[in-house]
Structure formats: structure tokens, C-alpha cells
Image (tube, rainbow, N blue to C red):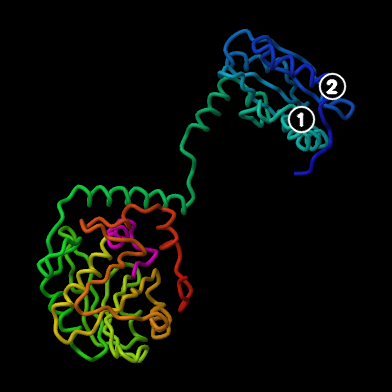
């Protein structure tokens, strides 16, 4: 907003300094614009509480003429309230003049003295009852944007997920004896064993069944790298293992690629469940591979996406091609989660990281085939 260039007169500066120093002898200072300067028009002492004294402004203010009121509140430390009174019935020139000067009032007299302000267009806006409504409005929860609501939901879901995992006993998985977050159902285990020893291009998709947090088979079929994205649910998180014959590395003709797909439209609680358990699923797969002769190695770099449609041959090549190194069939990968680590008790740091980091992961889909830094 443009400013008028009008500042406080020496008389107003002195009057306000005395009022600040006196701490109790002044309740209101009425300020008006006169001869292109801010001047004190009246000084009113306190006679009751601040809200009671506000009702006296009805007799101090005029119906059609703007004014500023510097008001000392009852708060400790002698905080001041700036009231900018510009009636709707004022002349247009006066409205513009007072509107363009109001910032100069508090700035010139010392912004640190003023902890609140009120914009009034009628006398009804500066009564004790109106000020009480103003305080209730300040104390009420602020309206949240859709993004802020999502962040709040994620924070609550994160807390619930962390509490649930920390409060539950760690379970022993029958596949490797390792402490994990999810149990593999027999059909998922069997499909995985078949996937890793074949030579074809096949995709195993699993979901987490609750209660019980058990991996459930969704599909197991032959697909090409170009078809992988179309085989993943567009609005629900899943884990997938893709047996991919490729020539990205001369020593690794076929790899098992772990895919964690979590669309941004997924329910928040589902996101938390899957993100906190993705590390354990990946580690368990690595442990199972170590017991299967002739199994294709598990790619050490996982594929993670918030937009399953982006996964195709180009995307997989970009994700795995430049740094694709396979894990030894006798070792278990240690990089887990969405950039986090699993603590071995079913509680990954994923479940405890900040909402900001979660938003970066899921707030919007990445552009197709773009490498993450």
C-alpha cells in the first residue's frame, strides 16, 4: 500500500512518550490528521477495566470522521492496541488519507509498543463486546488450507503409527528368523520364490492386509518393463517385485527390482503403514534370496514413486542403470525405507521423521523419468 508521507508531530511524540512512561494515567490517545501531521486530539484516563473503558469511545469518536486511537490495555508490560477507525460513511478522500497513513502511526511511535490492532468501520466495532469477540477470534484455531489439513492429518497418523509400532512386540518372520514389521503369507512367499528363479520378465504385486499386517498377493504375471506402471494401483500403496532381464550390467543379466508405489491420493494412514514397513519387506526379501539357489540378485537401489504411471522401461533404466549393483546372494541389503533405516523392531525411522519430509515424498508426483538427486 502506498503511504501518504504524513508523520507524527512533536506534540504527539511527546504525549505518547509521557503516556508510556506514566504506565497508568492514560487509557486512550485520540489521534487525527491536521495540517499534514498526526496530532493528539484528546487524552482519556482509565476509569475501569480496558473492556469497560472501550465503551467510552462511543462519545469520543464521530460518526463520519476517521481517527486513530492509541489504547493501553491491561496486559502486563503496558502493551498498546492501535485502533484504526475509518467509518464507511467517511468522505472518500478522508478514507484514502487515513488508510495510507495508518502504518506510519505505529512505525513512527515505536512498533514494539503495539502488540495488536483493530480496523473499525463503525463505533460498534470498538466496544468492549466487540473487543471480546476480537480476542476470541485470535484464540480460535486458524482456518487451514487443504495442504495444512493434509499436514495435520499426516502428523496425527505419524504419531499413531509410531506409537503403535513402539507399543507392539516385535514379531519373528518364519522366512528368515529376522525381526520384521510384516508377515509374508504362504502364497506371497511361494510366488516370490518362483519369481526369483525364473528367467522371464514377471511382476509380483503385494498389499498389506490389516488387521494382522500380513502381505497379501494381488497379482503375479508376465509383464514388460513398459507395462509395469499400468499394473500398479493408481490410488493405493503397494509393494512390488519385478523380475527384470536387462543388459544394464554385463555381469547381471536379470535383477529383482523392489518397487514401493505410494500415490499421493492414498489415505494418510495407509501411507504411514507402508512407509514404516517398506524397509522390513526389502530386507526380508534379501534374506529369503540368500536361501534360494540360482536366484536372481536383488537390486540394491529401490524404486519409489508417488505416481505409478511413470514407471516404464525408461524410468527403470534411469533409476537403476547408472548405479545398478546387485547384492550378494548371501547378504541382506541394509539400505531400507524411503531414505531411512529400520530399527529392527518393526519401527523404522520413517515412522518418526518430520511431516515436512513426508510432504516432500508424497505432496505431488515427480515428473516422468526424472532421476532423484
Write the residue at 25% across / 62% down: 277
Local packing at callout 2 (Cα closer than 10 Å; few below 14, some 14-19, many 20+) is: few
CA distance separating discs 1 and 2: 11 Å
Q: Quadrant of residue 294?
A: bottom left
Write the residue at 18% across / 72% down: 287
Residue 303 drawn at (x, y percent): 35, 74
Residue 348 drawn at (x, y percent): 28, 57
In the rendered structure, which disc, 1 or 2, sits on the residue that comes first in sequence? 2
Residue 362 drawn at (x, y percent): 41, 62
Position of 20 relative to 231 (above/below): above
> Which residue position is annotated with label 1?
108
Local packing at callout 1 (Cα closer than 10 Å; few below 14, some 14-19, many 20+) is: few
Q: Which label was assigned to residue 10?
A: 2
- Please tell me whether mark 2 sits on a helix, a strand or a loop: helix
Q: Which label was assigned to residue 326?
A: none
Question: In the image, which residues are magenta?
Answer: 261-276
Please check the rendered image and state whether residue 270 is part of the magenta-colored stretch, yes or no: yes
Q: Nearer the viewer, residue 213 or 71?
A: 213
Position of 58 relative to 82 (above/below): above
Write the residue at 39% across / 68% down: 306
- Residue projecting furthest to the top: 47
Q: Quadrant of residue 269?
A: bottom left
Q: Nearer the viewer, residue 219 or 191?
A: 191
Amino acid at each position: 500500500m502506498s503511504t501518504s508521507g504524513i508523520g507524527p508531530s512533536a506534540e504527539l511524540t511527546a504525549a505518547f512518550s509521557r503516556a508510556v512512561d506514566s504506565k497508568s494515567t492514560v487509557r486512550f490517545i485520540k489521534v487525527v490528521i491536521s495540517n499534514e501531521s498526526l496530532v493528539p486530539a484528546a487524552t482519556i484516563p482509565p476509569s475501569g477495566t480496558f473492556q469497560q473503558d472501550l465503551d467510552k469511545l462511543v462519545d469520543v469518536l464521530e460518526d463520519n470522521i476517521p481517527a486513530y486511537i492509541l489504547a493501553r490495555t491491561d496486559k502486563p508490560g503496558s502493551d498498546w492496541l492501535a485502533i484504526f477507525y475509518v467509518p464507511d460513511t467517511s468522505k472518500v478522500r478522508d478514507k484514502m488519507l487515513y488508510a495510507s497513513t495508518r502504518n506510519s502511526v505505529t512505525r513512527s511511535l515505536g512498533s514494539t509498543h503495539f502488540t495488536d490492532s483493530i480496523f473499525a468501520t463503525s463505533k460498534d466495532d470498538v466496544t468492549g463486546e466487540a473487543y471480546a469477540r476480537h480476542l476470541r477470534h485470535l484464540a480460535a484455531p486458524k482456518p487451514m488450507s487443504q495442504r495444512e489439513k493434509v499436514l495435520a492429518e499426516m502428523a496425527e497418523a505419524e504419531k499413531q503409527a509410531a506409537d503403535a509400532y513402539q507399543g507392539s512386540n516385535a514379531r519373528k518372520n518364519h522366512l528368515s528368523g529376522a525381526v520384521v514389521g510384516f508377515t509374508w503369507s504362504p502364497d506371497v512367499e511361494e510366488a516370490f520364490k518362483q519369481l526369483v528363479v525364473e528367467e522371464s520378465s514377471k511382476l509380483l504385486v503385494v498389499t498389506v492386509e490389516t488387521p494382522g499386517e500380513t502381505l497379501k498377493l494381488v497379482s503375479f504375471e508376465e509383464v514388460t518393463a513398459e507395462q509395469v506402471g499400468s499394473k500398479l494401483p493408481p490410488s493405493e500403496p503397494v509393494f512390488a517385485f519385478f523380475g527384470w532381464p536387462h543388459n544394464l550390467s554385463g555381469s547381471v543379466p536379470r535383477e529383482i527390482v523392489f518397487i514401493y508405489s505410494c500415490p499421493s491420493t492414498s489415505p494418510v494412514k495407509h501411507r504411514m503403514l507402508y512407509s514404516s514397513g517398506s524397509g522390513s519387506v526389502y530386507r526380508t526379501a534379501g534374506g529369503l534370496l540368500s536361501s534360494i539357489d540360482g536366484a536372481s540378485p536383488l537390486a540394491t537401489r529401490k524404486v519409489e514413486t508417488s505416481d505409478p504411471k511413470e514407471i516404464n522401461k525408461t524410468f527403470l533404466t534411469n533409476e537403476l542403470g547408472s548405479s545398478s549393483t546387485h547384492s550378494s546372494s548371501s547378504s541382506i541389503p541394509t539400505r531400507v525405507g524411503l531414505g531411512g533405516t529400520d530399527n529392527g523392531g518393526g519401527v523404522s525411522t520413517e515412522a518418526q521423521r518430520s511431516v515436512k519430509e513426508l510432504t516432500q515424498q508424497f505432496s505431488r508426483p515427480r515428473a516422468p523419468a526424472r532421476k532423484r538427486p
